[in-house]
Image (cartoon, helix red, strand yellow):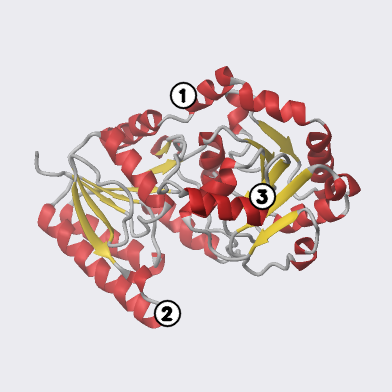
Amino acid sequence: MPEPRIIYIDPQSYHNLSVYDYHVLTALALPVLYLCSSCYDYKPVQGVVQKPVFSYNRIGNPLLKALSYAASLVRVARCIMRTQPRVVHVQWMKMPAVELPLYCWLRHRCGFRLVYTAHNVLPHNASASVAGTYARIYRRADALIVHAEYSKQQIIQMAGVDADKIYVARHGLIPQVHQPITAAQKAEWDTRYRLQGKLVFASLGEQSHYKGTDLLQRAWLNSPTLRHGNCVLVVAGKQKQINLEPLANCDNVVMVNRRLSNEEFYYFLSHTDVYVLPYREISQSGALLTAMAAHVGCVVSNVGALTEPLQAASVVWPQPAGDAAALQHALEHLATHPEEVRAMQADTAAWHRIDEFYSWQNMAEQTRKAYREV
């Protein structure tokens, strides 16, 4: 293998982000030194040198976690100085006040070009004061990769950076990543949740204010059509600073307030007819990309890139952000017109266009272009 001239750094490379890294690096097909988490839990990436350097997420104590992360940054710095790469590509900064000065100092010392992927323009539920920190990252990086044109324009407006240094690399679809569900486990969940024969609406994964789960609760509680129809709502995932107890009391709501295993997540997804994403704010949604990979249509708010699939096929139902009444109306329409949902599920031509539109090769092409031009 040729000596890697690109270092790709992802401290959060576990769960869905290990899947992301695997598909990006596989599609790139370049000699890369991949500095990843010791908790990387997907298939090994062929053709790259994979080196686990981050282990902070195994630690519960916040102080020890921070010290572990800082020690990992020392190991990262040593790798950079030893390798003398042409490009350093950073996926996330967990301690930006420390990492940005470190990478800038290393860049001055070693002469590489710094590429940063802005998965979200700002972190979820971020305070206004955080914007200045991320604006500095965007100004100091030599090239930025984003997943949607919306994010590019948002960064230009927020940080005043040159549009030419921002590359739009559309995020690929996220495939299922779980061990096969055993017959006994499936039988247990079938009995417990009783989803068969009903139109299933779902909100899966972490539940919080920015995701608009409270709007979904309001829409469901205010609608006799939804509460008494031949449908069920699944809200499954750890709830953070949000009270969904009133919704849990509904007879046709399945509520699971904890982190789901991959097997549980994909069990629920396999029974979902409509995925509900009433986000208040987002750049791009992994939940949307996971749902579309399973050919599940989504009710989405018109923020970030959630309505972008409409450029390829009509597989989402867009709604105004923050509007519980509009969300209620959309869900009621689908609950009383299940044939519309079934028709979308059966539209193989539409899903083929979505598969092509959100291909990992598109992301790889834009990433290679950033590496060449930076």
For label 1, the residue is 356
C-alpha separation, residue under disc 2 versus residue under disc 1: 42 Å
For label 3, the residue is 279
Quadrant holding the N terminus: top left
Nearer-the-camera pick, 307 or 213: 213
Question: Going 42% across and 46% down the picture, which residue do you hit?
Answer: 180
Within 10 Å of disc 1 (Cα), the crowding (few <14, some 14-19, many 20+) is: some
Q: Is residue 351 visible?
A: yes
Nearer-the-camera pick, 175 or 62: 175
Within 10 Å of disc 2 (Cα), the crowding (few <14, some 14-19, many 20+) is: few
Question: Going 59% across and 32% down the picture, which residue do you hit?
Answer: 308
Q: Position of residue 193 (x, y in %)?
A: 66, 54
* Amino acid type, label 2: Pro
Question: Going 78% across and 61% down the picture, which residue do you hit?
Answer: 247
- Closer to the chain start, of discs 1 and 3, is 3
- Closer to the chain start, of discs 2 and 3, is 2
Mark number, residue 62? 2
Quick one: SS at disc 3?
loop
Q: Position of residue 370 (x, y in %)?
A: 32, 36
